Amino acid sequence: MKPLLSNYPFVDTKDIYDARKKHASVWGPFKSKVQGKKKYHLVHNRCELQRSSLDYLSCTAGVHAESSVPQARYFLVLPLNGHLEVEVNGKGFSADATKAVVQVPWEHYKWRSVPMQAIFYGLDMALVNKSLPDGFRGRCGYTLEGSYRNVLKQTLVGFAESLDDWATGTVGTKRLPSFFKHMEAAVAACIADGIREWGAGGFEAGRIGHMPLMTIRTFMSDNLETEITVGDIADSVGVSIRTLQKGFVDHYFMSPKQMLKIMRLDKARELLKARKSHVHSVNGACKAVGYGHAGRFSKEYADRFGETPSETLKLTKALSH
Protein backbone atom coordinates (compact mmCIF):
# COMPACT_ATOMS: atom_id res chain seq x y z
CA MET A 1 0.00 0.00 0.00
CA LYS A 2 1.28 3.45 -0.87
CA PRO A 3 1.63 5.88 2.04
CA LEU A 4 -1.54 7.77 2.86
CA LEU A 5 -1.39 11.53 3.46
CA SER A 6 1.84 11.75 1.46
CA ASN A 7 1.36 15.50 1.11
CA TYR A 8 1.23 15.98 4.87
CA PRO A 9 4.76 14.94 5.91
CA PHE A 10 5.47 14.59 9.61
CA VAL A 11 8.36 12.19 10.08
CA ASP A 12 10.25 9.80 7.80
CA THR A 13 13.21 8.43 9.68
CA LYS A 14 15.39 5.40 10.34
CA ASP A 15 16.47 6.83 13.69
CA ILE A 16 14.41 5.93 16.78
CA TYR A 17 15.76 8.98 18.64
CA ASP A 18 14.62 11.31 15.88
CA ALA A 19 11.19 9.68 15.94
CA ARG A 20 10.89 10.11 19.71
CA LYS A 21 11.79 13.79 19.48
CA LYS A 22 9.24 14.55 16.77
CA HIS A 23 6.49 12.48 18.38
CA ALA A 24 7.02 14.28 21.67
CA SER A 25 5.85 17.50 19.99
CA VAL A 26 2.47 15.84 19.28
CA TRP A 27 1.75 13.40 22.11
CA GLY A 28 4.33 14.25 24.71
CA PRO A 29 7.32 12.08 25.67
CA PHE A 30 7.08 8.32 25.26
CA LYS A 31 9.48 5.74 26.63
CA SER A 32 10.05 3.44 23.68
CA LYS A 33 12.28 0.70 22.35
CA VAL A 34 12.53 -1.25 19.11
CA GLN A 35 11.87 -4.99 19.16
CA GLY A 36 13.53 -7.62 17.00
CA LYS A 37 16.37 -7.48 14.53
CA LYS A 38 14.60 -5.81 11.60
CA LYS A 39 15.81 -2.41 10.44
CA TYR A 40 13.83 0.47 11.87
CA HIS A 41 12.11 2.75 9.36
CA LEU A 42 9.18 4.87 10.48
CA VAL A 43 6.93 6.86 8.15
CA HIS A 44 4.31 8.94 9.94
CA ASN A 45 2.14 11.50 8.18
CA ARG A 46 -0.30 13.72 10.04
CA CYS A 47 -3.06 16.19 9.16
CA GLU A 48 -4.67 18.40 11.82
CA LEU A 49 -8.31 19.29 11.18
CA GLN A 50 -10.68 21.49 13.16
CA ARG A 51 -12.09 18.84 15.49
CA SER A 52 -9.94 15.82 14.68
CA SER A 53 -6.57 14.63 13.41
CA LEU A 54 -5.77 11.96 10.84
CA ASP A 55 -2.48 10.05 10.98
CA TYR A 56 -0.93 7.33 8.85
CA LEU A 57 1.88 5.28 10.37
CA SER A 58 4.11 2.63 8.84
CA CYS A 59 6.98 1.00 10.74
CA THR A 60 9.25 -1.85 9.64
CA ALA A 61 10.04 -2.90 13.22
CA GLY A 62 8.07 -3.85 16.28
CA VAL A 63 7.92 -1.16 18.96
CA HIS A 64 7.16 -1.06 22.69
CA ALA A 65 6.15 2.36 24.04
CA GLU A 66 4.74 3.81 27.23
CA SER A 67 3.44 7.24 28.22
CA SER A 68 2.00 8.86 31.33
CA VAL A 69 1.15 12.13 29.58
CA PRO A 70 -2.66 12.50 29.75
CA GLN A 71 -4.56 12.72 26.46
CA ALA A 72 -7.97 14.37 26.23
CA ARG A 73 -9.17 12.86 22.94
CA TYR A 74 -10.70 9.69 21.67
CA PHE A 75 -8.34 7.82 19.34
CA LEU A 76 -9.37 5.21 16.80
CA VAL A 77 -6.49 2.85 15.95
CA LEU A 78 -7.16 0.87 12.79
CA PRO A 79 -4.35 -1.43 11.56
CA LEU A 80 -4.15 -1.99 7.81
CA ASN A 81 -1.86 -4.94 8.54
CA GLY A 82 0.08 -6.30 11.48
CA HIS A 83 -1.01 -6.64 15.10
CA LEU A 84 -0.86 -4.37 18.13
CA GLU A 85 -1.72 -4.51 21.80
CA VAL A 86 -2.50 -1.43 23.87
CA GLU A 87 -3.15 -0.91 27.54
CA VAL A 88 -5.31 2.10 28.37
CA ASN A 89 -5.45 3.06 32.05
CA GLY A 90 -4.59 -0.52 32.96
CA LYS A 91 -7.04 -2.30 30.63
CA GLY A 92 -5.77 -4.23 27.60
CA PHE A 93 -7.03 -4.26 24.00
CA SER A 94 -5.73 -5.69 20.74
CA ALA A 95 -6.27 -4.73 17.10
CA ASP A 96 -5.39 -6.21 13.72
CA ALA A 97 -6.77 -6.50 10.19
CA THR A 98 -10.14 -7.69 11.58
CA LYS A 99 -10.74 -5.24 14.42
CA ALA A 100 -10.02 -1.66 15.45
CA VAL A 101 -9.74 -0.13 18.91
CA VAL A 102 -11.26 3.11 20.16
CA GLN A 103 -9.01 4.46 22.93
CA VAL A 104 -10.58 6.82 25.42
CA PRO A 105 -8.75 9.78 27.00
CA TRP A 106 -6.01 8.25 29.13
CA GLU A 107 -3.77 8.89 32.08
CA HIS A 108 -1.39 6.01 31.39
CA TYR A 109 -0.80 4.23 28.11
CA LYS A 110 1.24 1.25 26.86
CA TRP A 111 1.72 0.20 23.26
CA ARG A 112 3.19 -2.96 21.77
CA SER A 113 3.24 -3.65 18.04
CA VAL A 114 4.83 -5.81 15.39
CA PRO A 115 5.86 -4.24 12.04
CA MET A 116 2.67 -2.69 10.76
CA GLN A 117 0.75 -0.02 8.88
CA ALA A 118 -2.11 1.75 10.65
CA ILE A 119 -4.49 4.68 10.55
CA PHE A 120 -4.96 6.77 13.71
CA TYR A 121 -7.91 9.09 13.97
CA GLY A 122 -8.12 11.44 16.95
CA LEU A 123 -11.46 13.05 17.77
CA ASP A 124 -12.46 15.80 20.17
CA MET A 125 -14.43 14.27 23.04
CA ALA A 126 -17.51 16.38 22.36
CA LEU A 127 -17.68 15.12 18.78
CA VAL A 128 -18.27 11.55 19.98
CA ASN A 129 -19.92 12.10 23.36
CA LYS A 130 -22.88 13.95 21.92
CA SER A 131 -23.83 10.75 20.09
CA LEU A 132 -23.21 8.39 23.03
CA PRO A 133 -25.57 7.48 25.87
CA ASP A 134 -24.25 8.41 29.31
CA GLY A 135 -23.46 4.81 30.22
CA PHE A 136 -20.94 4.49 27.41
CA ARG A 137 -18.80 7.45 28.36
CA GLY A 138 -15.69 7.19 30.47
CA ARG A 139 -14.84 3.54 29.74
CA CYS A 140 -11.25 2.52 29.02
CA GLY A 141 -11.87 1.64 25.40
CA TYR A 142 -13.91 -0.27 22.85
CA THR A 143 -13.27 -2.82 20.12
CA LEU A 144 -14.96 -2.34 16.73
CA GLU A 145 -15.32 -5.38 14.49
CA GLY A 146 -17.23 -6.53 11.43
CA SER A 147 -19.02 -3.98 9.30
CA TYR A 148 -18.16 -1.00 11.50
CA ARG A 149 -14.43 -1.68 11.22
CA ASN A 150 -14.68 -2.20 7.46
CA VAL A 151 -16.72 0.95 6.84
CA LEU A 152 -14.36 3.01 8.99
CA LYS A 153 -11.37 1.71 7.04
CA GLN A 154 -12.94 2.60 3.70
CA THR A 155 -14.09 6.00 4.98
CA LEU A 156 -10.74 6.98 6.50
CA VAL A 157 -8.73 5.84 3.45
CA GLY A 158 -11.06 7.96 1.31
CA PHE A 159 -10.74 10.82 3.81
CA ALA A 160 -6.93 10.69 3.54
CA GLU A 161 -7.03 10.58 -0.26
CA SER A 162 -9.39 13.58 -0.32
CA LEU A 163 -7.06 15.54 1.95
CA ASP A 164 -4.10 14.69 -0.27
CA ASP A 165 -6.01 15.77 -3.38
CA TRP A 166 -6.90 19.04 -1.69
CA ALA A 167 -3.27 19.67 -0.74
CA THR A 168 -2.06 19.21 -4.33
CA GLY A 169 -4.83 21.23 -5.99
CA THR A 170 -4.65 24.86 -7.00
CA VAL A 171 -6.58 25.83 -3.87
CA GLY A 172 -4.58 23.56 -1.58
CA THR A 173 -3.04 26.45 0.31
CA LYS A 174 -6.40 27.81 1.38
CA ARG A 175 -8.27 26.63 4.45
CA LEU A 176 -10.08 23.31 4.20
CA PRO A 177 -13.64 23.56 2.86
CA SER A 178 -16.73 22.90 4.95
CA PHE A 179 -17.33 19.40 3.56
CA PHE A 180 -14.41 18.12 5.65
CA LYS A 181 -16.48 19.04 8.72
CA HIS A 182 -19.19 16.75 7.41
CA MET A 183 -16.63 13.96 6.97
CA GLU A 184 -15.48 14.45 10.58
CA ALA A 185 -19.08 14.22 11.75
CA ALA A 186 -19.72 11.10 9.63
CA VAL A 187 -16.70 9.26 11.06
CA ALA A 188 -17.64 10.26 14.62
CA ALA A 189 -21.22 9.05 14.08
CA CYS A 190 -20.00 5.70 12.73
CA ILE A 191 -17.70 5.25 15.75
CA ALA A 192 -20.53 6.15 18.14
CA ASP A 193 -22.89 3.71 16.38
CA GLY A 194 -20.25 0.99 16.61
CA ILE A 195 -19.78 1.63 20.34
CA ARG A 196 -23.54 1.47 20.96
CA GLU A 197 -23.79 -1.73 18.95
CA TRP A 198 -20.84 -3.16 20.89
CA GLY A 199 -22.63 -2.37 24.13
CA ALA A 200 -25.79 -4.07 22.90
CA GLY A 201 -23.89 -7.23 21.94
CA GLY A 202 -25.11 -7.00 18.37
CA PHE A 203 -21.83 -6.91 16.48
CA GLU A 204 -21.37 -8.76 13.22
CA ALA A 205 -25.00 -8.74 12.13
CA GLY A 206 -24.05 -10.11 8.71
CA ARG A 207 -24.78 -13.68 7.66
CA ILE A 208 -23.34 -16.41 5.51
CA GLY A 209 -26.17 -18.54 4.26
CA HIS A 210 -28.76 -18.40 7.04
CA MET A 211 -26.25 -18.32 9.91
CA PRO A 212 -25.13 -15.09 11.67
CA LEU A 213 -21.40 -14.39 11.52
CA MET A 214 -21.19 -14.35 15.31
CA THR A 215 -22.60 -17.88 15.47
CA ILE A 216 -20.01 -19.04 12.92
CA ARG A 217 -17.21 -17.40 14.92
CA THR A 218 -18.51 -19.04 18.10
CA PHE A 219 -18.51 -22.46 16.42
CA MET A 220 -14.91 -21.91 15.34
CA SER A 221 -13.89 -20.72 18.81
CA ASP A 222 -15.52 -23.71 20.50
CA ASN A 223 -13.57 -26.12 18.28
CA LEU A 224 -10.09 -24.58 18.28
CA GLU A 225 -8.51 -27.50 20.11
CA THR A 226 -9.66 -29.94 17.44
CA GLU A 227 -8.24 -30.21 13.93
CA ILE A 228 -11.28 -28.47 12.50
CA THR A 229 -11.14 -27.80 8.74
CA VAL A 230 -12.74 -25.23 6.47
CA GLY A 231 -14.96 -28.07 5.21
CA ASP A 232 -16.16 -28.71 8.77
CA ILE A 233 -17.06 -25.04 9.16
CA ALA A 234 -18.90 -25.00 5.82
CA ASP A 235 -20.87 -28.09 6.82
CA SER A 236 -21.90 -26.49 10.12
CA VAL A 237 -23.09 -23.38 8.27
CA GLY A 238 -24.87 -25.43 5.61
CA VAL A 239 -23.10 -23.85 2.62
CA SER A 240 -20.40 -24.87 0.17
CA ILE A 241 -16.74 -24.17 0.92
CA ARG A 242 -16.71 -21.65 -1.92
CA THR A 243 -19.70 -19.76 -0.45
CA LEU A 244 -18.07 -19.77 2.98
CA GLN A 245 -14.80 -18.43 1.58
CA LYS A 246 -16.58 -15.67 -0.34
CA GLY A 247 -18.53 -14.68 2.76
CA PHE A 248 -15.37 -14.37 4.85
CA VAL A 249 -13.58 -12.33 2.21
CA ASP A 250 -16.61 -10.03 1.89
CA HIS A 251 -16.87 -9.46 5.66
CA TYR A 252 -13.31 -9.88 6.93
CA PHE A 253 -11.09 -9.48 3.85
CA MET A 254 -9.54 -12.87 4.60
CA SER A 255 -10.25 -16.55 4.13
CA PRO A 256 -11.81 -18.72 6.88
CA LYS A 257 -8.47 -20.56 7.11
CA GLN A 258 -6.67 -17.28 7.84
CA MET A 259 -9.31 -16.33 10.40
CA LEU A 260 -8.98 -19.73 12.07
CA LYS A 261 -5.22 -19.26 12.39
CA ILE A 262 -5.66 -15.82 13.97
CA MET A 263 -8.22 -17.16 16.44
CA ARG A 264 -5.92 -20.03 17.41
CA LEU A 265 -2.93 -17.76 17.96
CA ASP A 266 -4.97 -15.22 19.93
CA LYS A 267 -6.37 -17.99 22.14
CA ALA A 268 -2.87 -19.38 22.69
CA ARG A 269 -1.64 -15.94 23.78
CA GLU A 270 -4.60 -15.61 26.14
CA LEU A 271 -3.72 -18.97 27.72
CA LEU A 272 0.00 -18.18 27.99
CA LYS A 273 -0.64 -14.78 29.59
CA ALA A 274 -3.27 -15.98 32.07
CA ARG A 275 -1.73 -16.35 35.52
CA LYS A 276 -4.30 -18.96 36.57
CA SER A 277 -4.32 -20.85 33.27
CA HIS A 278 -4.33 -24.63 33.14
CA VAL A 279 -1.65 -24.32 30.44
CA HIS A 280 1.87 -24.34 31.88
CA SER A 281 4.03 -24.94 28.80
CA VAL A 282 4.40 -23.87 25.18
CA ASN A 283 3.61 -27.42 24.09
CA GLY A 284 0.44 -27.32 26.18
CA ALA A 285 -0.69 -24.09 24.52
CA CYS A 286 0.13 -25.54 21.11
CA LYS A 287 -2.09 -28.58 21.73
CA ALA A 288 -4.86 -26.54 23.37
CA VAL A 289 -5.45 -24.56 20.17
CA GLY A 290 -5.19 -27.43 17.69
CA TYR A 291 -1.69 -26.89 16.30
CA GLY A 292 -0.18 -30.17 15.21
CA HIS A 293 3.36 -28.85 14.77
CA ALA A 294 5.10 -26.99 17.61
CA GLY A 295 7.75 -25.42 15.37
CA ARG A 296 5.16 -23.92 13.03
CA PHE A 297 3.15 -22.74 16.03
CA SER A 298 6.16 -20.91 17.52
CA LYS A 299 7.05 -19.24 14.21
CA GLU A 300 3.52 -18.06 13.44
CA TYR A 301 3.06 -16.89 17.04
CA ALA A 302 6.26 -14.82 16.85
CA ASP A 303 5.23 -13.38 13.47
CA ARG A 304 1.93 -12.20 14.94
CA PHE A 305 3.00 -10.98 18.38
CA GLY A 306 6.65 -10.04 17.98
CA GLU A 307 7.84 -12.50 20.62
CA THR A 308 8.04 -16.28 20.94
CA PRO A 309 5.51 -18.19 23.04
CA SER A 310 8.28 -19.15 25.45
CA GLU A 311 9.04 -15.43 25.99
CA THR A 312 5.37 -14.76 26.74
CA LEU A 313 5.25 -17.65 29.22
CA LYS A 314 8.48 -16.53 30.90
CA LEU A 315 7.08 -13.03 31.44
CA THR A 316 3.80 -14.42 32.81
CA LYS A 317 5.68 -16.58 35.32
CA ALA A 318 7.83 -13.62 36.36
CA LEU A 319 4.74 -11.49 37.02
CA SER A 320 3.15 -14.27 39.03
CA HIS A 321 5.98 -14.30 41.59
Image (cartoon, rainbow, N blue to C red):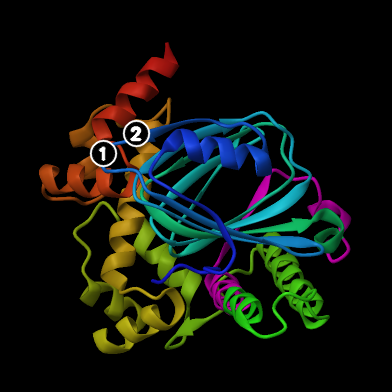
Which secondary structure, mark 2?
helix
Q: Considering the image in quadrants, where does the N terminus appear?
A: bottom left
Say which residue label 1 marks: 285
Q: Position of residue 128 (x, y in %)?
A: 80, 61
**Which residue is painted at 24% across and 29% down in the image?**
310
Which residue in the structure is indicated by mark 2? 272
Q: Which residues are magenta?
A: 130-159
Q: Quadrant of residue 55?
A: bottom right
In-front residue for pair 221/108: 108
Residue 284: x %, y % from top left: 22, 35
Query: Is residue 53 shown above or below 69?
Result: below
Disc 2 marks which amino acid?
Leu
Identify the residue at image location x=34%, y=86%.
246
Marks 2 and 1 close (CB-CB < 8 Å):
yes
Q: Quadrant of residue 301?
A: top left
Outermost residue toward the top in this view:
321
Q: Label 1: state its secondary structure.
A: helix
Q: Could you tell me which quadrant the C terminus lies in?
A: top left
Res 11 label: none
Q: State which quadrant residue 173 falls in.
A: bottom right
Q: In the rendered view, would you say 7 is above or below 124?
A: below
Crowd rating for badge 1 (residues with CA inside 10 Å; few <14, some 14–19, many 20+):
many
Q: Percent from the top left, x then y, of residue 150?
A: 53, 74
Which amino acid does the dot numbered 1 rest on? Ala
In depth, the one of 222 and 143 nearer the eye is 143
